[in-house]
Image (tube, rainbow, N blue to C red):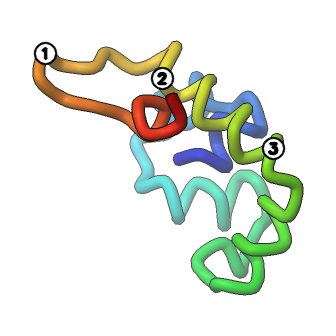
């Protein structure tokens, strides 16, 4: 999901009805999206990861009593 948010494709993802990994593989052309090496290189810059976490937190509805990764960053 964080890759989808980082790529600003959340609306397209929601319309697709696909699982996040399938959307990344098929629509974003990232066939290795589930591999450790791909994720490690994609988020090699920590600020890229922080930006994606912030976008996620701003976009999704967080239920009362639940937390997101942004809460850990604080």
| Residue occupied by mark 1 | 64
Splitting the image into 4 quarters, where does residue 24 fall?
Answer: bottom right
Q: Residue at x 75, y 74 (%)?
A: 40
Splitting the image into 4 quarters, where does residue 66 fall?
Answer: top left
In the image, residue 26 lies at what x, y percent? Answer: 67, 62
- Distance between the Cα atoms at labels 2 and 3? 14 Å
In the image, residue 37 lies at what x, y percent? Answer: 75, 85
CA neighbours of label 3 inside 10 A, class few (<14), some (14 to 19), many (20+): some
Picture disc at residue 57: 2
Image marks 1 and 3: residues in contact by CB distance under 8 Å: no
CA neighbours of label 1 inside 10 A, class few (<14), some (14 to 19), many (20+): few
Relative height, residue 54 to residue 30 (above, below): above
Q: Residue at x 77, y 38 (%)?
A: 7
Q: Secondary structure at mark 2?
A: helix
Which residue extends farthest left?
65
Q: Residue at x 49, y 54 (%)?
A: 20
Dot 2 or dot 1: first in sequence order is 2
- Distance between the Cα atoms at labels 1 and 3? 27 Å
User: Is 10 on the left or on the right of 18, as rendered?
Assistant: right
In the image, residue 30 lies at what x, y percent? Answer: 76, 68
CA neighbours of label 2 inside 10 A, class few (<14), some (14 to 19), many (20+): some
- Pick whichever, 13 or 66, lies toward us: 66
User: Is 40 on the left or on the right of 72, as rendered?
Assistant: right
User: Is 18 on the left or on the right of 12, as rendered?
Assistant: left
Relative height, residue 30 to residue 12 (above, below): below
| Residue occupied by mark 3 | 48
Picture disc at residue 29: none
- Pick whichever, 49 or 32, lies toward us: 49
């Amino acid at each position: 999901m964080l890759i989808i948010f980082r790529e600003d494709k959340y609306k397209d993802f929601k319309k697709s009805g696909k699982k996040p990994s399938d959307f990344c593989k098929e629509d974003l052309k990232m066939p290795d999206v589930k591999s450790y090496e791909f994720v490690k290189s994609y988020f090699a810059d920590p600020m890229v990861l922080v930006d994606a976490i912030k976008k996620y937190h701003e976009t999704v509805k967080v239920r009362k009593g639940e937390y997101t990764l942004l809460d850990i960053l604080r």
